[in-house]
Amino acid sequence: MNRAFLEARSVSKHFGGLQAISDVSFDIRQGEIFSVIGPNGAGKTTLFNLITGFLAPTRGEIYFKGEKISGLKPYQVARKSLGRTFQLTTLFERNTVLENLVIGQRATRETSVLHGMFGWRGKRSAENKTLERAHQLSETIGLGREKDMVAGLLPQRAQKQLSIGLALASEPELLLLDEPAGGLSAGEVGMIIELISRIRDAGTTICLIEHKMSMVMNISDRILALNYGKKVTEGTPAEVCQNEEVIKSYLGEKYAASRRSC
C-alpha cells in the first residue's frame, strides 16, 4: 500500500467569495481504507464532487493512477474506474434489487458497438453476463434473499447496501462512499463495516466520508481531517484522534479522552 493511487495537489474550490476547499493536498494509497472527517460545512462532499467530476477545481489538480482527472465530466471519471455513492441514497425505487444492479452495469458500459458487431447473439451473451454479475453483486452486498424486492420498500440499512452495490456495478478500482452508515443503528453500522471490509479485501480501494467516529477509527488505515475547507491533518487513526485542532473542532474532549491510549 505504498503507491499513491489518487493524489490531490493544492486543490481549491471557490463559490464566489466562499472558499469551500482551500489548498488541500493528500494522497490515497492503493488497497487502503481512507476516511475524510470534519464538521458539517468542512468541505467533505465538495471534495468528493471535485474528485468525481461534478465540480471542477478553481485551482489545483487531481490525479488517478498518474493520470489527471480534474476537469473531466462525471461519466468520464467513472470510466476511469472510480465509483461513488451519495449522501442521500439514490436508487431506482420502482425496480427490484436485481434490476437496480443490472441498470447500474448498463449505465457505465458501452455495449452498442459490441452488439452491432455480433448481432443478437452478442447481445444475448452480454445480457446473460450482466444478469449473472447482478446476482453475484446481490450476494456480495448481503441482499441475495431480497434480490426480488422492490428497492423503494427496502429498510434504510438495505437501501444503503444497495447504493453500495450500484457503485460496485461499474467494477471500480476506487470506491468513494459518502456517509454509508448515516442514519443507521449501532447493529446496522456493524453490517456496513463488514461489507466495506469485504470490498476492500476483494481488491477495491475505499475512500469514505463518515460522522460515526467509532466506525472511522476502527476501519480506517488513514484519515484526512478538514475544517472550514482546509486540511487540519492527515495520518493514522492514532495520530488524528490526538491532534488538538481535530479535538477542538470536531471530536471533543470527551471522545478524545476515551482514545488517549490509541
Image: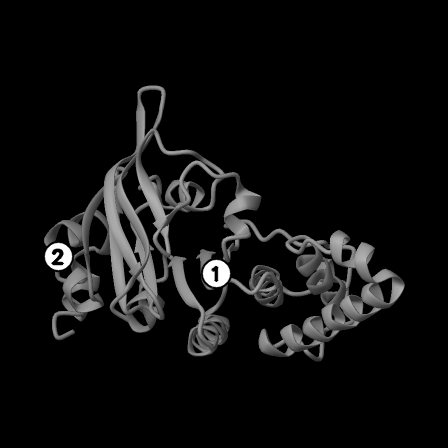
Residue type at numbered disc 2? Asn
The residue beneath circle 2 is 243
Q: Could you tell me if the residues under marks 2 and 1 are in contact, i.e. CB atoms within 8 Å?
A: no
Structural distance between the alpha carbons of marks 2 and 1: 25 Å
Q: Find disc 1 in the rendering and name its residue.
A: 180
Q: Residue at x 34, y 72 (%)?
A: 219
- Colouring rule applied to residues: one colour
Name which residue type carries label 1: Pro
Q: In terms of image quadrants, where is residue 109?
A: bottom right
Left or right of 247? Residue 46 is right
Residue at 86% x, 68% y: name it: 121
Callout 2: few (<14), some (14-19), or many (20+) C-alpha neighbours within 10 Å?
some
Near mark 1 (Cα within 10 A), the count class, few <14, some 14-19 or many ≥20, is: many
183 or 105, which lies in front? Answer: 105
Q: Quadrant of the C terminus?
A: bottom left
Q: Residue at x 33, y 69 (%)?
A: 32
Q: Is residue 86 above or below residue 12?
A: below
Which label belongs to residue 66?
none
Residue 167 at what x, y percent from top left?
57, 59
